[in-house]
Image: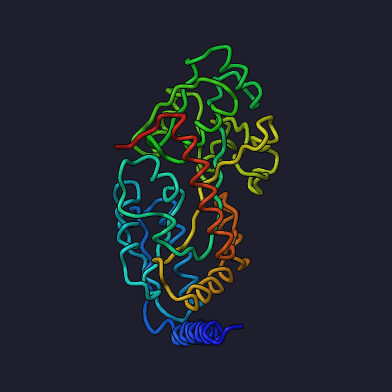
């Protein structure tokens, strides 16, 4: 080896070791104070609820206050941009959901890049929807719904909380894979959409499991399938959409926590270990089961892969559906 190359490699190795030692040193002194978690949605929704559950448990784990800050607006874009531009010191995190990967395709311009501007920490949980129908619709299985929609193209109406929402896109993926034409009826929020479904204004909806279970048990709605890859513990007798004939179908709301890109590796690894510990806690798992969700707690690499896969998947669905928000 030439002397200059050898000196270069030795110097490069010294820099890498110094960087690693510096990251470990930063992590050893972290956190020295409160950690802010930006939730880019108003209080009361699913992402906010997940944030508050995590915040309480994470605060106990790191022995420091965890402050939830709701910065809603533009389907999560405002708060997400705020988090992306925050200091890269581990004291500002982002807790968000599937909007992170769908908004780039739904909006002509957003103030952040979901991959380049964030360092993933952990995928927290999956929250599948349930494909439900009003009892007046003569369909008691996915196969029957598909047959009905094909026989009556444009006559079956489905509800969603808003254009571009997770339930809307779940239905568009279903339409694409099943080859059916159902008409989208967007409401101003999940509450009005559910009211429209219960009253019979619309016949079909991909509804959050937490909201669906009580109405299915009461008989006011009929559950055809769940959108997750496996059956839900809260609805063990309800098959998945994939089991029901649409192989490969999967669509779930999800929750994850990230940090601004450039945050110390030591801090990211430390946060990941705390978050995974929280998500594997038996009490946390049971709380999520009760809400129709599934606890995950992933590695940083698994979450990064999940984000990239979801961006590609939903970009195709959105392009095919023509869905736009602005």
x and y, in percent, of residue 158 in the image? 47, 26
Looking at this view, name the residue that lies furthest to the front.
2
Picture quadrant where residue 114 is located: bottom left
Q: Is residue 20 visible?
A: no
Residue 150 in the image: above or below residue 274: above
- Relative to residue 243, is residue 53 drawn left or right? left
**Residue appearing at x 40%, y 72% in the figure:** 66
x and y, in percent, of residue 208 in the image? 51, 42
Residue 175 in the image: above or below residue 249: above
Colour scheme shown: rainbow
Picture quadrant where residue 59 is located: bottom left
In this rendered view, identify the residue nearer to me: 62 or 74: 74
**Residue appearing at x 43%, y 60% in the figure:** 95
Residue 304 in the image: above or below residue 222: below
x and y, in percent, of residue 55 in the image? 44, 68
**Residue appearing at x 60%, y 61% in the figure:** 285
Q: Is residue 233 visible?
A: yes
User: Quadrant location of the C terminus?
Assistant: top left
Q: How many marks?
A: 0
User: Quadrant location of the N terminus?
Assistant: bottom right
Residue 13 in the image: above or below residue 198: below
């Amino acid at each position: 080896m030439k002397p200059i190359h050898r000196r270069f490699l030795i110097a490069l190795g010294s820099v890498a070791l110094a960087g690693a030692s510096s990251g470990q040193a930063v992590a050893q002194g972290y956190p020295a104070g409160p950690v802010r978690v930006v939730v880019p949605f108003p209080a009361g929704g699913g992402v906010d609820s997940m944030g508050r559950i995590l915040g309480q448990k994470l605060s106990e784990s790191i022995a420091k206050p965890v402050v939830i800050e709701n910065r809603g607006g533009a389907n999560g874009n405002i708060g997400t941009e705020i988090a992306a531009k925050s200091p890269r010191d581990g004291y500002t995190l982002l807790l968000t959901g599937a909007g992170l990967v769908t908004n780039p395709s739904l909006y002509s311009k957003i103030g952040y890049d979901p991959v380049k501007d964030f360092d993933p920490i952990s995928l927290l949980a999956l929250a599948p929807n349930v494909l439900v129908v009003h009892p007046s619709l003569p369909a008691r299985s996915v196969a029957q719904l598909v047959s009905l929609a094909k026989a009556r193209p444009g006559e079956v109406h489905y509800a969603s909380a808003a254009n571009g929402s997770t339930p809307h896109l779940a239905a568009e993926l279903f339409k694409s894979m099943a080859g059916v034409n159902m008409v989208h009826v967007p409401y101003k929020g999940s509450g009005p959409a559910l009211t429209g479904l219960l009253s019979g204004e619309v016949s079909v909806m991909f509804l959050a499991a937490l909201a669906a279970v009580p109405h299915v048990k009461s008989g006011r709605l009929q559950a055809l399938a769940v959108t997750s890859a496996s059956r839900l513990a809260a609805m063990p007798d309800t098959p998945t959409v994939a089991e029901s004939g649409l192989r490969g179908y999967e669509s779930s709301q999800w929750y994850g926590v990230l940090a601004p890109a450039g945050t110390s590796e030591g801090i990211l690894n430390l946060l990941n270990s705390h978050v995974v510990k929280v998500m594997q806690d038996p009490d946390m798992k049971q709380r999520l089961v009760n809400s129709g969700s599934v606890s995950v707690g992933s590695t940083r690499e698994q979450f990064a892969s999940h984000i990239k896969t979801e961006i590609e998947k939903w970009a195709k669905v959105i392009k095919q559906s023509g869905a736009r928000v602005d």
